[in-house]
Amino acid sequence: MNRRDLMKGVATSVAAAAFLPAVAARAQTIAKPAIVMANASARTKIDLSGEWHVSIDPYRAGLVDAVGDPSKPRHWRYADVNVQEAEVKNPGTFFEQDMRRSGTVTLPGSWNAQKPEWRYYDGLMWYQRVLEAKPEAGRRAFLYFEASNYTTHVYLNGKKLGVHVGGFTPFAFEVTDVLRDGENRVTLGVDSEHDANAVPPVITDWDIYGGVTRPIRFLTTPLTYIDDAFVRLGRDGIIRASVALNGASAAGQKVVLTIKGQKALAATTDANGKAELSVKAPKSLKLWTPETPTLHEVRIEAAGDVFTDRIGFRTVEVKGEDILLNGKPIFLRGISHHEEEIGTNPARVITEDAARKLLTEIKTGLNGNYVRLSHYPHSEVTVRLCDEMGLLVWSEIPVYWAVNFGNPDTLKIAQTMLTENILRDRNRASVIIWSIANETPQTEVRNQFLRTLAQTARDLDETRLVSAALLVERKIVDGHIDMHIDDPLIPALDIMSVNTYNGWYGDDKLEALPATVWRADVKRPLILSEFGADSKAGFHDPQLKRKYSEEYQADYYRNTLAMADKIPYLRGLSPWILKDFQAPRRQHPIYQQGWNRKGVISETGERKLAFNVLSDFYKSKMN
Ligand code: GCU
């Protein structure tokens, strides 16, 4: 989207400036979630993927009555009632739903892909299944959700456990005291609606993807367990571990940390159940790089619990206009990537195979060493694969386009989402950048909002870099395109990143692109975080080279890369985008059909001409 379109959004943001003091007043970091459950998948007792009963609820009757009063019991999908039995026992009663006799769908998977009539459904959907588990003496029990889009109400045996807001980060509820020795039923009310105060706001350029899109896990722990562990290599050569226990005996516990092949470290938790451990990294420590993605077996024992993970050690920093990985300058050869599997009807179900197929196209197909996981936190399985395959990661929260920057509650949602994102992934060596925004209007209320987010990221993680995808006003100066990077947010960022679409949006001729002059007010490394052009795979037009042809897209890449290669402080590229993706705003009946076609591969994985242009360019950048 070009800046002119977006700046129209400024009006709403400026109007919100009246909230400025409120935003500033609320600019403290937020509390961590009560349950982090680091590396939860390692604790899985039951994976609740599979068949779930499903019941649509477009007017939210299960939550609120027609006139705004509390909903009536006959609509309560979560009630601990066998409807069929109740109807027989008391003919005078009646219900207007029955989860146990409703149809079923397979979770995880967005409902938009599961039935044609649900293709663009944007509302509340109910799910229910039986959980075969019972209370265990000396153990605590939890339900852990990897992601559910957008607001998720969770019930067990008719009791509301809580609600989570945000479609892309994990959350958990303790069920120790609700679990019974018999049939347990989990009921979820998932509402995809995200309004003007949400993150992202109403309009995005990707699909609704409502529902439970990632696995749900039932897991148990000792009465006191290791809830959070952040193990990292500092720029000072010190390995640090921050460990947090959760439980009645969290204080005064001995914590033992072992990195395979190294001497064990020990410490004792403080009154809050926290312990810090540190040691100078041995010279022999094999560092993580994209070429040698070394992961070390890390084991932490405390209070009878054991936490294990495979963690890479590396440092990343900015020095002048350079990005340094393990002290050496690096160029990020990447591409942007939406979370969507290859296929003609994706349900946003990212299995390890689905992720590996896409990431291999970047690593091997494009000669890449980097991926921008846009515009929201992707599945943990994807980030773990980047650790394993050697792809550096830009991780992003969907503070996207016309966010209500003046609303303190919106700030809290964004901070919570960023916190959940960082707590889940801060042991992933591949992640080097936390991104806090995409294409947001340059107003003071937005600047304050984003400066707060940048601080939130730094408070949680001193080892990574902070960026945001910015917009730059395109001007014509002395007959050439002039791009003046002047966003007032940049001093709060480690890396300045710019989305630019000259040659696609607007009427610039492709041959004018290489002569573009880029100017920056602040000295920072630059990433071109987006540039791209649509093409319909198989539409060839070698003569006219019309837009939407593969030839136009390939020429666009050749000219834009020639332009990029001349920017002396350019340190990375993540063109828009690896694969064509579902986008309801894109409805050209011949070329789009509800897909954004800027992929260098089609939705079925077919490589387009532009793929080789980018692959060859990156091959030339490999030292
Ligand atoms: C925008 C935006 C993307 C969008 C792309 C496009 O800059 O960041 O989410 O899909 O450009 O217009 O295709």
Image (tube, helix red, strand yellow):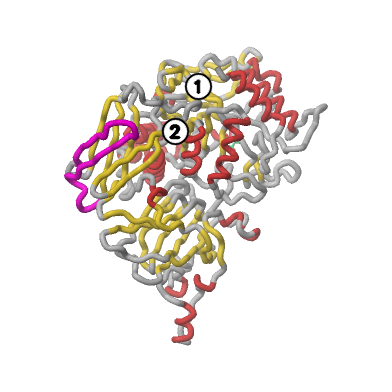
Q: Which quarter of the rendering shows the N terminus?
A: top right
Question: In x, y percent, where is residue 265?
Answer: 25, 34
Residue located 71% across and 19% down the image? 511
Is residue 301 toward the left or the right of residue 114 in the image?
left
Instruction: Indicate the quadrant where residue 492 lies.
Output: top left
Q: Which quarter of the rendering shows the C terminus?
A: top right
Pick whichever, 194 or 279, lies toward us: 279
Residue 289's tag is none
Q: Which image quadrant shows ligand 1? A: top right
Task: Judge whether residue 287 is colored magenta.
Answer: no
Q: Which residue does the numbered mark 2 point to in the structure image?
A: 431
Is residue 220 toward the left or the right of residue 88 in the image?
left
Q: Which residue does the numbered mark 1 point to in the structure image?
A: 526
- Circle 2: residue type: Val
Q: Which of marks 2 and 1 is in front?
A: 2
Residue located 41% across and 18% down the image? 327
In the image, farthest residue toward the right: 543
- Circle 1: residue type: Leu
Residue count near mark 2 (Cα–Cα under 10 Å), binned few <14, some 14–19, many ≥20: many
